[in-house]
Each structure stands twice: as C-alpha cells, then as structure tokens.
C-alpha cells in the first residue's frame, strides 16, 4: 500500500520518519520556494511582494496585506494569510504543519512561527513532527492569539 503524498500527511499531522521515501520532496519544495523568496526579499514594491507571496503560498494575498521584507518561508503552500495583516521585518515561517494568520493580525519584527519540530530523544530526533498554528486577533486587543492543536 503506497503512502499518500507527504505534504498531505504533514497537513494531517502525521509524524514523518527520517527514512520516509518521499522525504526528499520537502527539500526540493523548499529550494523552489527559496527562488521566489530571493525575488520577493529584493523587492521594495508592495504589490510585487504580495504577488510573489501569493505564488509562494499558492493563495490570494489581499491588497490590504503589508509585508516588510525579508520574510523567510520553508514551504509556503501550507500558509494562509487573511486581510489587513501586517508582517514586520525578518520573520520566519516554517509551515509544513500549517500556519493560518487570520484577518487584522499584526506580527512584530524577528518573529518565528514554527509549525514543525523534532522529538527530544536522540534516537528519534531526525523525525519531523508537524502541528498546525492558528493566529487570530483578540477582540478588544491589538495582540494576536497563538494556538497550537495537538
């Protein structure tokens, strides 16, 4: 029985073993994302930045979204960004487990949002553990609320 696509398994929260036969595809996808990131991070045009971010995330990035580059993303296709979102300089998104940023969220400089990690025991440390992250605006506050399932 053939395993389903590794990216679908990641989004479903499946732990990916170090010897997964599809593991190499994660690295290939990251290199493809990096090509677009280089263009995006060298642009000062907000419309071009949003366009490239749309290509990276494979979703529509609303005109109300502002991103101060550089921004770093390892995959991109598991990131969803709402309307009126502001992402400040030098943020990192590791999104293999899924990242959702809802409307009206402000993200400060140098923030890392990591939806994937590794087990603590040394013998399992090469495995990848994905967990989705969902950030939403708190009512009556300018702060975001971070929640992780799992």
Image: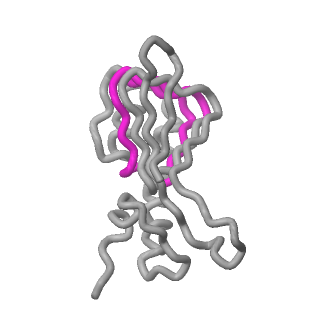
Q: Position of residue 46 (x, y in %)?
A: 42, 24
Q: From where the camera sits, is residue 29 visible? A: yes
Q: Position of residue 64 (x, y in %)?
A: 35, 20
Residue at the outermost right position: 122
Question: Residue drawn at (59%, 29%), measured in percent from left and top?
Answer: 89
User: Where 12 falls versus 144 (above or below)?
Assistant: below
Where is residue 74 shown, x and y percent of the image? 51, 53
Q: Going 30% across and 47% down the picture, which residue do you hit?
A: 58
Q: Quadrant of residue 127?
A: bottom right
Along the line of sight, which residue is nearer the eye, 117 or 69?
Answer: 117
**53 drawn magenta:** no
- Is residue 109 depicted above or below 26 in this figure? above
Give the left or right position of residue 12, taking residue 15 as reference: left
Q: Is residue 76 above or below residue 60?
A: below
51 with respect to 149 (left or right): left
**Was residue 80 drawn as part of the magenta stretch in this picture?**
yes
Question: What is the magenta segment's predominant secondary structure?
Answer: loop
Q: Name the residue furthest bottom.
A: 1
Tell me where residue 117 appears, x and y as whole percent: 58, 59
Q: Residue furthest top?
A: 140
| Closer-to-camera residue (26/33) | 26
Say left or right for 37 vs 65. Answer: right
User: Residue 44: in sight, yes or no?
Assistant: no
What's the magenta region?
A: 65-90
User: Residue at left 33%, top 45%?
Assistant: 55
Question: Where the N terminus falls, by quadrant?
Answer: bottom left
For the rendered model, the colour scheme is one colour
């Amino acid at each position: 029985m053939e395993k389903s696509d590794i990216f679908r398994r990641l989004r479903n929260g499946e732990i990916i073993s170090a010897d997964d036969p599809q593991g190499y595809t994660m690295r290939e996808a990251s290199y493809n994302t990096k090509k677009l990131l280089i263009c995006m991070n060298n642009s000062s045009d907000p419309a071009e930045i949003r366009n490239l971010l749309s290509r990276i995330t494979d979703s529509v990035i609303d005109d109300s979204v502002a991103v101060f580059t550089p921004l770093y993303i390892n995959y991109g296709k598991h990131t969803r960004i709402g309307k009126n979102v502001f992402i400040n300089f030098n943020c990192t998104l590791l999104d293999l487990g899924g990242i959702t940023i809802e409307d009206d969220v402000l993200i400060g400089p140098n923030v890392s949002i990591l939806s994937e990690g590794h087990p603590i025991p040394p013998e399992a440390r090469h495995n990848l553990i994905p967990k989705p992250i969902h950030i939403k605006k708190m009512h009556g506050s300018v702060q975001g609320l971070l929640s992780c399932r799992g």
